[in-house]
Amino acid sequence: MDLAMQERILRLSIPEPNSGCWLWTASENGHGYGNICVGGKNGAVIRAHRASYEAFKGKVPAGLDLDHLCRVRCCVNPDHLQPVTQKENILRGTGWGAKNARKTSCLRGHPFTEDNVYKNGPGRQCKTCARLRALWQRADLKKK
């Protein structure tokens, strides 16, 4: 454990008593994540939560990202961080990809089951809706 880095992280964050978060008070990037310089004057700038995890818990396993379990981007409490795959981190989030992955039915209410879904790249398409669209298109062509 890197005691100097631990002391630095504790000095540059403030504890939030209700949530247990350690709120980063130093430099942040444009997305709300803390930045910290490691390796002296000409060192690299890394995410503060990653530096905190590594200082208090150890290396982040290769190929894994750190997920903020508290959902607070500027939190550097290592107990609020969990190493997960990038896919798992995204699916746990609140972005459009995560929201779509959690959907259990299409806009018309047809269930997203294995037998009712076309895999369309990263997305899904309802087979029932596709069949209905095809019927409507054929009916429109007959009218012309």
Image (spheres, rainbow, N blue to C red):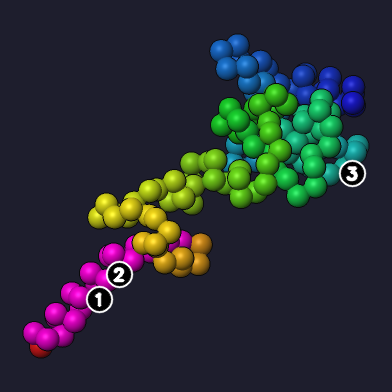
**Residue 99 visible from this viewpoint:** no
Question: Is 3 rendered above or below residue 99?
Answer: above
Q: Earlier in the sequence, mark 3 or mark 1?
A: 3
Can residue 127 be seen here? The reply is yes
Residue at left 68%, top 41%? 84
Q: Which residue is mark 2?
A: 130
Lateral position of residue 67 relative to residue 18, left or right: right
Magenta region includes residue 93: no
Please report contact status of discs 3 and 1: CB closer than 8 Å, yes or no: no
| Amino acid beneath label 1 | Ala
Residue type pointed to by label 2: Ala
**Residue visible at 68% across and 31% down in the picture:** 81
Task: Give x and y (percent) for residue 51.
Answer: 79, 34
Is the residue marked by circle 1 packed among few (<14), some (14-19), or many (20+) residues within 10 Å? few
Residue 50 drawn above or below residue 63: above
Residue at horizontal 33%, vertical 66%? 127
Q: Earlier in the sequence, mark 3 or mark 2?
A: 3
The residue that label 1 is drawn on is: 134
In the image shown, does 26 or 9 lie closer to the viewer?
Answer: 9
Q: Nearer the viewer, residue 35 or 124?
A: 124
In x, y percent, where is residue 128?
Answer: 29, 64
Q: Which residues are magenta?
A: 123-143
Residue at 90% x, 26% y: name it. Answer: 2
Is 63 rendered above or below residue 22? Answer: below
Residue occupying the far top of the picture: 17
Marks 1,2: beta carbons within 8 A: yes
Tell me the mark number nearer the camera, choosing from 3 and 1: 1
* Mark 3, residue position: 42
Q: CA distance from mark 3 to mark 2?
A: 57 Å
Residue at mark 1 to residue at mark 2: CA–CA distance: 6 Å
Number of marks drawn: 3
